[in-house]
Image: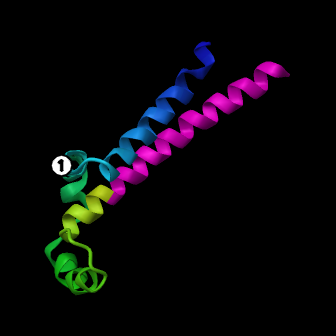
Amino acid sequence: MLIYIPLILSIAVIGILLLPQINSRADVALDGIGLRLFGDAFSTDARQRTQRPQMEAAHIPQSYRSFVSQTVLYSVLIGIAAGLASLTIFRSCCKAV
């Protein structure tokens, strides 16, 4: 039974990432978390100025800083979820052998 705890955590992380599709408050919360964690790491004024016309052309309603930080946050969380799921699969396969 303890073998499946990483799988349950993985499903919970994916559920958190799907929550903004249902609730706009969750989108604001994840955006704030992403900005706090990664906002200054990838955002420079020169990059924002060059990317802004491309983002407007793609009809992205966020600022460049917000978009990049949220994308990085989603990527990190998906990586964690995939790692937890693969850990569960690896443990169940090795236990059977």
Residue at the spot x=18%, y=69% of the render? 63
Query: In the structure shown, which secondary structural element does the residue marked by tag 1 occupy?
Result: helix
Q: Residue furthest front?
A: 22
Where in the figure is residue 44, as x and y percent of width and height? 18, 70
Main SS type for the magenta part? helix
Which quarter of the image is occupied by the N terminus?
top right
Q: Is residue 80 magenta?
A: yes
In the drawing, does residue 60 fall left or right of residue 5? left
Where in the figure is residue 55, as x and y percent of width and height? 26, 79
Q: Amino acid at mark 1?
A: Gly
Q: Residue furthest left?
A: 45
> In the rendered image of this protein, does residue 32 appear above or below residue 2?
below
Q: Which residues are magenta?
A: 71-97
Residue carrying label 1: 32
Where in the figure is residue 93, as x and y percent of width and height? 77, 28
- Specify the quadrant of the image occupied by residue 51: bottom left
Residue at the spot x=22%, y=52% of the render? 31
